[in-house]
Amino acid sequence: MSDHRSGDARRAALDSFLDERCAAGYSVETRSTAQAVIVRRQRLHYLLQWFSRGDGRRLVVSVDQNGEITTVAAEPRRW
């Protein structure tokens, strides 16, 4: 039963963090129960992609069993 509560706490913490980031201009690329990849793109991203390196600021967001959020820079996409 504590695993179920732990999962709910993790999900709630991640939901809250992602809501804050989305309000700040990020969008969710992928998501699971305990992890997500978010990206913040610049305004004219589709025009600038030909001239810039990378595809915006990508972050991996993780939440541990205690509900603590950590973020690290994600590797660039490889197409």
Image (cartoon, rainbow, N blue to C red):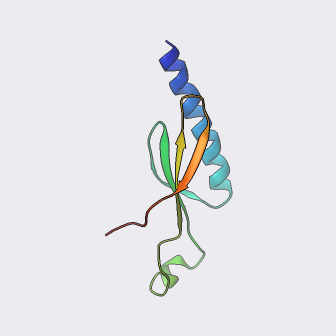
The residue at the far bottom in this view is 51
Q: Quadrant of residue 17?
A: top right
Residue 37: x %, y % from top left: 48, 53
Name which residue lies at 50% across and 83% down.
52
Residue 50: x %, y % from top left: 44, 86
The residue at the far left in this view is 79
Residue 40: x %, y % from top left: 57, 64
Name which residue lies at 53% across and 77% down.
45
Figure disc tally: 0
The residue at the far top in this view is 1
Compared with 9, 60 (above or below) is below
Which image quarter is the C terminus in? bottom left
Compared with 34, 54 (above or below) is below
Name which residue lies at 47% across and 59% down.
74
16 or 66, nearer to the observer? 66
- In the rendered view, does 32 fall on the left or right side of 70? left
43 or 76, nearer to the observer? 76
Residue 3: x %, y % from top left: 48, 19
Compared with 33, 28 (above or below) is below
Name which residue lies at 56% across and 69% down.
41
